[in-house]
Amino acid sequence: MDAVKIGLLGLGTVGGGTVTVLTRNATEIARRAGRGIAIAHAAARDYNPSAINGLDQIARIGDDAFAVVNDPEVQIVVELIGGYSPARELVLQAIANGKHVVTANKALIARHGNEIFAAAQAAGVMVGFEAAVAGGIPIIKALREGLAANRIEWIAGIINGTGNFILTEMRDKGRDFADVLAEAQALGYAEADPTFDVEGIDAAHKLTILAALAFGIPLQFERCFTEGISKIDALDVTYAAELGYRIKHLGIARRAAAGIELRVHPTLIPHRRLIANVDGVMNAVLVKGDAVGPTLYYGAGAGAQPTASAVIADVVDVVRALTTDPNNRVPHLAFQPDALADTPVLAMEAVETAYYLRLSALDQPGVMARIASILGEEGISIEAIKQKEPNEGETHVPLVMLTHRVREGLMNQAIARIEALEAVAGAVTRIRVETLAG
Ligand code: HSE
């Protein structure tokens, strides 16, 4: 049988990795897909030929991405340019032309996935996006197929490799934030705009996708609460360790009584949890299903060949399903499109979690009691409290507290009241705490 012809948009880190892996493993991949896979047409603005093995296997390379999606020879368009636009227009054009699409673009799927999947459904084509979440980890496949029997209760994931790399290097080697970020950029891990990594936007894109697949709800990126890692202080890393915790930047999606929690923020997790020990650029996703219990997926979350691994797996899936009835394929968002639920995504004020608080309080009788009584009045129960030694000549001491679970809205009120006390200097640092118990 003839090779399936793909069109490749982008020859950057992931595009280059895809060409390299497709070339190196061509025979093995063809044995799995049932046919060879040939790159008929690629488009890229600029690329580094010395970083890519197999460029000579590409029949035609140009710089016009629309020429690729309009090329009658191309059956599957592989979109690896990233960003919202022109990726959205290119993907919609490919679908309108009756082509299947594979993309690694989490921003595109999180923001425009509902529109893209509706168009694909109407056209009877597939859109694969395994590489959009957690790089090389087959988490989309696991959620959509492997866990199909379960009612998913919650997901918690380290889903941004750059952020995890920064936190790990800061903790283990005391390295400077900016210096580690520059290294992540040089290694091709970081987004074109690295604030997407450090402010949690990239993780929010990925969590939005995971939540839709887990709970059968439409993609709702705009409802995701997002807090980054740029304000994490070395002090908190140290105090968290003394209390038996590690700080990780987590994406959490949970089915609560009133709706779905969807939140990305730094989180204290017990250091004994496997996921607390996921370091560097590695990603990990914990999924709790009612039947299977907790399951953990671990692997490289970024980088050329790990991401190419997921892209090519999607291409193989599409090749295998080319002749199947479009109505009998695995649904894009795991649930049948007419069976998506309108369960609301909760506002952050309605989310319930435990907290780590750090504040600077006047070292005087009655101050601790006043703070504890404000927490009590707001219905917040303290689990642990530590007063650290004051620095030489200082009037204020650091106070560190762990609380039991409480609604974020009540915690906001308590923090505002504590910050208004004359005996408290500056802002209260708040980091959410999750035990992630199975
Ligand atoms: N910038 C992303 C990360 C790339 O660091 O995880 C993979 O999506």
Image: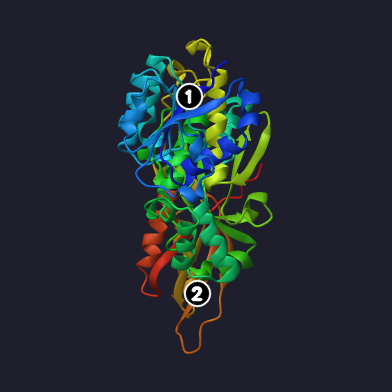
Proximity of marks 2 and 1: CB atoms separated by less than 8 Å: no
- Disc nearer the start of the sequence (2/1): 1
- Reading the image, the residue beneath label 2 is 398
- Reading the image, the residue beneath label 1 is 5
Give the residue type that dot 1 points to: Lys
The residue carrying pointer 2 sits among few (fewer than 14), some (14 to 19) or many (20 or more) residues within 10 Å by Cα, namely some
Q: How many marks?
A: 2
Q: Which mark is residue 310?
A: none
Q: Is residue 100 left or right of residue 85?
A: right
Q: Can residue 239 be seen? A: no
Q: Is residue 3 left or right of residue 346?
A: right
Decide if ligand 1 comes within 8 Å of the CB at mark 2: no
Where residue 168 sits in the image (x, y, percent)? 57, 61
- Residue 45, compared with residue 259, is above or below; it is below
Decide if ligand 1 comes within 8 Å of the CB at mark 1: no
Where residue 294 sits in the image (x, y, percent)? 66, 38
Q: Kindly report the distance in space between the C-alpha atoms of the residues bearing marks 2 and 1.
A: 63 Å
Select label 2 or label 1 by which is in front. Answer: 1
Where residue 140 sits in the image (x, y, percent)? 55, 32
Q: Quadrant of the C terminus?
A: top right
Where residue 404 sits in the image (x, y, percent)? 56, 53
Q: Is residue 202 left or right of residue 172?
A: left
Is disc 2 placed on a helix, strand or loop?
strand
Where residue 157 sits, quadrant-wise, is: top right
Give the residue type that dot 2 points to: Pro
Residue shown at 35% from the left, 32% from the top: 112
Q: Can residue 301 be seen? A: yes
Front-lying residue, 3 or 318: 3
Give the image's coloring scheme: rainbow
Residue shown at 59% from the left, 35% from the top: 138
The residue carrying pointer 1 sits among few (fewer than 14), some (14 to 19) or many (20 or more) residues within 10 Å by Cα, namely some
